[in-house]
Amino acid sequence: MIIGEQKPLEEIKELIGDARKVLVAGCGTCVAVCSAGGEREAQILASALRLAFQVDGNSREVTEATVQRQCEWEYIDPLAEQVAESDVVVSLACGIGVQTLVERFPEAWIVPGLNTTFLGMPQEQGIWVERCQACGQCILGVTAGICPIARCSKQLLNGPCGGSHDGKCEVNPDIECAWHLIYERLRKLGKLELMLRFQPAKDWSVSRDGGPRRIVREDLRVLPET
Amino acid sequence: MSEANGYKSGSRLEKLLRAGHFVVTGELGPPQSADGEVICQKARLLKGKCDAVNITDNQTAIVRLSSIGSGIICLQEGVEPIVQMTCRDRNRLAMQSDLLAAYALGVRNLLCLTGDHQSFGNHPTAKNVHDLDSLQLIHMMAKMRDEKVFQCGDPIKGAEPRFFIGAAANPFADPFDWRPYRLLKKVEAGADFIQTQLIYNVEKFAEYMRRVRELGLHERVYILAGVGPLKTPGMARYMRDKVPGMEVPDALVERMEAAGRDIPKEDKEARNAAWREEGIKITVELIEQLRQIEGVAGIHIMSIEWEEGVGLIAERAGLLPRPTVGELEDR
């Protein structure tokens, strides 16, 4: 899922600027699960903003609304009226949600209330970890299901660098060396020969480096190409 | 031409290794400024004390005068450079382009490295590249030389860059059992010579070399064992405790501590001299032990910000004078 982290209140206030009517829009999917931008967080942020504006001595109108998914037009359509009445919408969705709002409501001023941080999973209560970089050419089949693109600090493809120490990355002892994990898993499963294979230079054109990506599935389309 | 006489690059380093000499390489760290004179001075200190000199590429991710630029200055000083290139700062286009220029300007030795992470340096908010990893860089350069093709497969229509291709090896990094196989991968990718991480634990290195020989790699690649003088007990402790992938035995730390113990703290100069003397002594002993290990083709002396150290160590280890090119060609 997509993991996000709320921006500091001061930064959100700055993004709101002089706007009188503020709508805080939560999203009920990924960012709700990681407790960054769901219904609860939208309510808390709206209250915090009301309080902050009160302290600052200027009255503003802060409302909140949460939809199940901000990244699909049919889910955000019910927000149309509230968005139209607002001077600014603080979206607590990931960057995709923010932009879906922008594309659906081109007249509205939409700002992000989150930093979208990574694609990952909850490791334990209160800890989320990165697992995928959406590089467009999955290599998990040869790396024992552990992604060196997302988890090696240098995105190496041919084994651990000289900075691997006691299973930890040279960058930070809190980071596990992805290649150490790959090595250990391949060893236990009797597949170390996979690591001896030379992995050629990666095709980054299918990653973000090739420009914004798009998938067209003709078998699923109903509208003709414009 | 190089193909006709059987050399890959025709570099002095390659010729000496091929001739069976026990080679000595040094290291030169470019300045954090545009002052080329610093390189000239360091090059003069190293000249005649070793066969070729590594020029670091923004080492520890700190911006410095470029390794290629510094290498050219070394050439002008009559010192053969081994230009280091990391995968951190350049993509495959920039690497090939810069290395074409390096070759055109006379550089013949190249060391292909992953590179220290940018978080260690003075631009921790930089975006790193790692378009290629060090193995892919080695492979690319071997294909440019041997197959006359760019990384994309397009033919090189003019002169191809013919480098003597080097790679690094850290026998002390984890997983230890994997390290000889990583070396195997580098050799298969096209490495001609290897320079190792600093060795202080000879016993562990000997075990690594035993495994390397089992894979037959000592006959396929020239392995230069890395050494470097400890300068203070503090440095010894720091390297033992804080540097990932570095092993400094307690006995060596204790020797460094003992070296300055009887000298009053106030007499900084005398203490420093005593520590440096002990550091050199240890390095010379290490070289003597490393030379005995089958498959060690030379020594790489990393005397960081103490270029005089290389000459002192080489002298005391009986590695001077270095053979001249003339002598070499007479053989």
Image: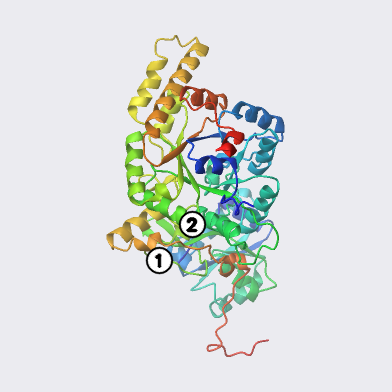
Is the residue under label 1 in contact with that under label 2 (CB below 8 Å)? no
- Within-10-Å neighbours for mark 1: few <14, some 14–19, many 20+: some
Same chain for the residues under marks 2 and 1 in the image: no
Observer-nearest of A136 and B41: B41
Q: Nearer the viewer, mark 2 or mark 1?
A: 2
Q: Is residue A215 left or right of residue B210?
A: right
Residue B71: x and y in percent read 65, 40
Query: Which quarter shows the C terminus of chain B?
Result: top right
Can you identify the residue that label 1 sits on? Answer: A142
- The type of residue carrying mark 2 is Ala
Element type at marker 2? Answer: helix
Picture layout, residue B244 above or below residue A212: above
Observer-nearest of B216 and A67: B216
Can you identify the residue that label 2 sits on? Answer: B189
Chain containing mark 1? A
- The type of residue carrying mark 1 is Val
Q: Is residue A176 left or right of residue B39?
A: left
Chain containing mark 2? B
Q: Is residue B204 left or right of residue B327?
A: left
Can residue B254 be seen in the rendering of this structure?
A: yes
User: In the figure, residue B106 lies in which quadrant?
Assistant: top right
Residue A67: x and y in percent read 51, 73
